[in-house]
Image: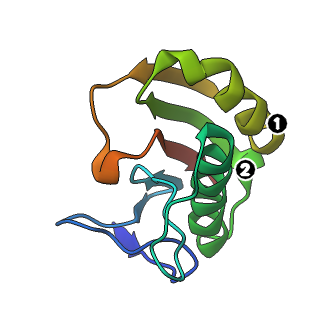
């Protein structure tokens, strides 16, 4: 197993890693929409989905992979009413349409509106 880290995505805010490579698979931790430069959180679901996708992308890039190598995602929404707006942004990044679970949760870290985790293959 290999721990992955990039300063182009937010550092972990708890006792976990940004991602792990296990064999030819890369598992990202859930990425909230925190700007890696200053930790700020943008307003609104579209901007937050965009930043979460960018954070996942930065981790994939650090592993030498792109969104096209993702085969499974798990998405967490604070409000399922944001599902359509979230999907509009998500679809721009995950164009290969990986398998996905999307669930509403009561609260996310830092009270963000969404979080995305991904599994990719080399």
* Residue 111: x %, y % from top left: 34, 46
Q: Which mark is residue 67?
A: 2
Relative to 40, residue 110 above or below: above
Q: Tell me the quarter of the picture where residue 86 sits.
A: top right
* Residue 34: x %, y % from top left: 48, 63
Direction from residue 26 to residue 12 in the image, left or right: left
Q: Are marks 2 and 1 in contact (CB under 8 Å)?
A: yes
Relative to 93, residue 101 above or below: above
Reading the chain from its start, which is encountered first: label 2 or label 1?
2
Residue shown at 66%/49% (left/top)?
47
Element under disc 2: helix
* Residue 81: x %, y % from top left: 55, 16
Look at mark 1 in the image and give the residue it sits on: 95
Relative to 57, residue 7 above or below: below
Q: Which mark is residue 25?
A: none
Element under disc 1: loop
Give the quadrant of the N terminus.
bottom left
Circle count = 2
- Using the numbered discs, state the Cα–Cα distance from disc 2 to disc 1 in whole angstroms: 8 Å
The residue at the far left in this view is 15
Neighbour tally class for label 2: few under 14, some 14-19, many 20 plus, Cα within 10 Å: many
Direction from residue 22 to residue 80 in the image, left or right: right
Q: Tell me the quarter of the picture where residue 56 sits.
A: bottom right
Residue shown at 60%/43% (left/top)?
44
Relative to 54, residue 46 above or below: above
Report if residue 31 is visible in the image.
yes
* Residue 30: x %, y % from top left: 41, 49
Direction from residue 113 to residue 94 in the image, left or right: right
Q: Nearer the viewer, residue 70 or 43?
A: 43
Report if residue 97 is visible in the image.
no
- Coloration mode: rainbow
């Amino acid at each position: 197993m290999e721990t992955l880290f990039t300063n182009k995505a937010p550092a972990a805010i708890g006792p976990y890693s940004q991602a792990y490579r296990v064999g030819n698979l890369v598992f990202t931790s859930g990425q909230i929409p925190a700007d890696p430069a200053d930790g700020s959180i943008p307003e609104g679901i579209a901007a937050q989905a965009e930043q979460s996708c960018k954070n996942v992308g930065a981790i994939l890039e650090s592993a030498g992979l792109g969104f096209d190598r993702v085969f499974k995602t798990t998405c967490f929404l604070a409000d399922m009413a944001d599902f359509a707006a979230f999907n509009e942004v998500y679809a721009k990044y995950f164009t290969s349409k990986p398998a996905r679970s999307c669930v509403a949760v009561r609260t996310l870290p830092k009270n963000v509106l969404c979080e995305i985790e991904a599994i990719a293959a080399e």
